[in-house]
Image (tube, coloured by chain):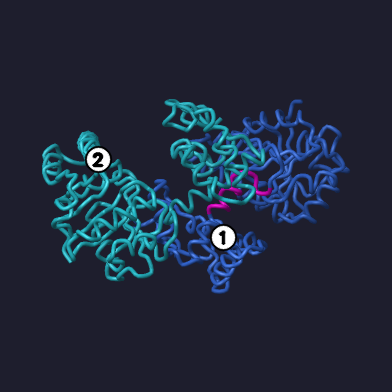
Chain colours: A blue, B cyan
Amino acid sequence: MEIANICILGAGNLGSRIGLQAALSGFQVTVYDVNQKSLSGSLVTMNKLIKYLIKSQEITEKKGLEAIQRITFTPDPLVAVENADLISESVTEDLDIKKSVWKQFGHIAPAKTIFTTNTSYLLPSMLAEDSGRPKQFCAFHFHDVFHSKVVDIMPHPNTDPELIAVLEDLGRKLNQIPILVKKENSGYIFNTLLVSLIDAAGRLATGEVAEIEAIDKSWMINFNMPIGPFGILDNVGIDTAWHITSVKRNAASRAFADLLKTYIDQGKLGEKSGEGFYKYPNPSYKNSDFLK
Amino acid sequence: MEIANICILGAGNLGSRIGLQAALSGFQVTVYDVNQKSLSGSLVTMNKLIKYLIKSQEITEKKGLEAIQRITFTPDPLVAVENADLISESVTEDLDIKKSVWKQFGHIAPAKTIFTTNTSYLLPSMLAEDSGRPKQFCAFHFHDVFHSKVVDIMPHPNTDPELIAVLEDLGRKLNQIPILVKKENSGYIFNTLLVSLIDAAGRLATGEVAEIEAIDKSWMINFNMPIGPFGILDNVGIDTAWHITSVKRNAASRAFADLLKTYIDQGKLGEKSGEGFYKYPNPSYKNSDFLK
């Protein structure tokens, strides 16, 4: 099937990025949000991204203008899905909210519409039945669209297998590298790997095997990387890491969650709060003398 | 204390690298091995490294020649330790062999000698008593000396705390970044992190969540890395990875060990055998179209 019209549900950061990339790739785009303020914010976000893409010579000014003209922002669900070939849902990462959004849009979307969720940690099988059309439902998960240009395609057991090739093709048209996740797995591939790495770093820290900076140094030097596990944690947000870690029951995870909590209690959430394991905007790991 | 004379036990690849770097840093070096062939091989290895370092403009030809002149190769234990300020032991990674070497050299080394082991996975406390001088005993673990320029300093509970600063200083003189591992931990820091990452990759593969190439792609794109977990495994050696994994008792590790074994049974040990998860010398992950 030919995809021409893409409907974005949720005008937050990722919805805006996916919507803009879709428009830049020549698709007609509608961006829906219940909140009019989010819709205005989405346009601001897109215009900032366009400026950045022009500056880094990835697009021309003309191409940016044309993309914006292909996008309709609307708080009206019917207008949003009117002619949608595909829905990409990026609403709040909350099971109940996502379920109710899929119930609503499953009722009003045209029969042709492919349903995709951009969920980070939920599984498509948790939402597919709510949409009323489980065969047309699949996870289609973007990372940040413009830097990590990768999209995970993760079907649930009842997804129509033919949908996979359609989404792989669409992913490439959206300038992403499609990665097939054959079986449902919370966190897809990358987050599963990253969480394991960070858990191991947490065990070294809570076990007092090494200082946080020593752990990061060891990783950075051996892999010639600009950042180590605790720098990554500051970037992800210590509160987010705590939410993921605190639900695990093993002793090592509990100890690590306790360590993260001591930072949160001091208001140290990472880069966004100005301090976490490192101080921002100039964390020591970025200094030239860190690796000495 | 001033270190001037360094004795290397074991003339294999790492012993040769440490010995050469010590000589390049101006130390007098003796390289000991029971096997005369290993001693000749060590000189060949060092001369190759010198050529490489000259070619990459890290040293001059004169500096390389001077370094070789500072090195004595000997199969005589008494000659090797005669005036040693420090022993760096890199003999075969086998507990019994290392124990007997430390018993032997603990008896004949001068009173001043600092004892260090370059073990990869054993703990210094397993060897310290054999040396007869546990307070002077510490792990001092190099990665590959000339690329990953990092040295782990890992004391056991009875190591003299004053030794740590001496080894940190020596590490810097040997052109390495010293990393303190405060408590004994098998695999130090980096291997603990790497093994966790690889275990997670193994779970994704054996759980049939994703194909091996998809797992590597996801890691490579998101971290902008030239290699993913299975490429690293090919580099480490699938047989080595199997030895580490097969001793673990949990179901996930057993499944992963079984997967590794199917490769070993086909003679696919990774890069060194010409094939592993990828085919060498031109593995697909190095092709420009791998990330598409």
Q: Position of residue B190 (x, y in %)?
A: 43, 52
Indicate whether residue A192 is drawn in magenta: yes
Indicate whether residue A222 is drawn in magenta: no
Amino acid on which the number 2 mark rests in the picture: Asn
What is the number of callouts on the image?
2
Residue that numbered label 1 is attached to: A237
Q: Magenta residues, as a range?
A: A186-197
Residue that numbered label 2 is attached to: B35
Q: Quadrant of the N terminus of chain A?
A: top right
How many residues crowd mark 1 within 10 Å: few (<14), some (14–19), many (20+)?
A: some
Amino acid on which the number 1 mark rests in the picture: Gly
Judging depth in this view, the residue of A18 and B142 nearest the camera is: B142
Residue ID at (18%, 65%) = B112
Q: Position of residue B205 (x, y in %)?
A: 62, 39
Does residue B159 show up? Answer: yes
Judging depth in this view, the residue of B83 and B169 nearest the camera is: B83
Of all chains, the one bearing label 2 is B
Q: Nearer the viewer, mark 2 or mark 1?
A: 2
* Element marked by disc 1: loop
Which quadrant of the structure image shows residue A177? top right
Indicate left or right for A11 with A241 as reference: right
* Element marked by disc 2: loop
